[in-house]
Amino acid sequence: MMTEAEYNQYTSDFNAACAGDGTAFGAFYDNYYEPQAVFEYIPNATRNVGKEITVSFWQSVHEVMQEEIKAHRTLVISESNIAVEAPIDFFCKKDLEWVGVQHKEGSSFRLLMAGFYDFADNGKIKYVRVYSIFHPNYQLG
């Protein structure tokens, strides 16, 4: 189980890893995830299993943009699960296409994310599903 304060620390630690040079993703993973945790990103139904693949995915995203999870809008905690809704801001380091929308280098955009975390008995994340949507109504400013 994770408390709201611990979840807030989790997002703070993730944001710090994103703000750095990308080398902190491994330590972040070790601190919060089971060794063979599954990270599923939807709408692409991409599944990353284990530290090596998940950290590599985070680093590949980091090469083209920096993300920042904002304060959650909704957080529901049970003994073994968390459900959360929060905006995530992305700052483009290069021209790119993300969730079907073109973005220019130096621009930013926001996704609305819903995340569902399943925890192992030791308190580490064993499975996470992240659903993200882009919509003009969710954008910055």
Image (cartoon, rainbow, N blue to C red):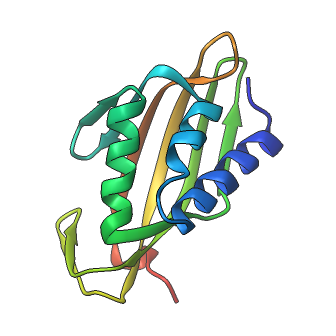
- Front-lying residue, 117 or 138: 117
Number of marks drawn: 0
| Residue found farthest to the top | 121
- Front-lying residue, 11 or 58: 58
Q: Position of residue 109 (x, y in %)?
A: 39, 77
Using the rendered image of the protein, determine whether residue 39 is visible from the camera's viewpoint.
no
For the N terminus, give its image quadrant.
top right
Q: Residue at x 36, y 89 (%)?
A: 106
For residue 4, side relative to residue 105 (left or right): right
- Front-lying residue, 12 or 73: 12
Q: Where is residue 88 in the image (x, y as percent from the top left)?
A: 50, 64
| Rendered view: 43 above or below 73 | above
Q: Which residue is drawn at 68% across and 36% down?
A: 76
| Rendered view: 41 above or below 89 | above
For residue 56, side relative to residue 96 (left or right): right
Q: Where is residue 96 in the image (x, y as percent from the top left)?
A: 20, 75
Q: Residue at x 69, y 56 (%)?
A: 12
Q: Where is residue 104 in the image (x, y as percent from the top left)?
A: 25, 87
Using the rendered image of the protein, determine whether residue 15 is visible from the camera's viewpoint.
yes
Q: Residue at x 51, y 41 (%)?
A: 26
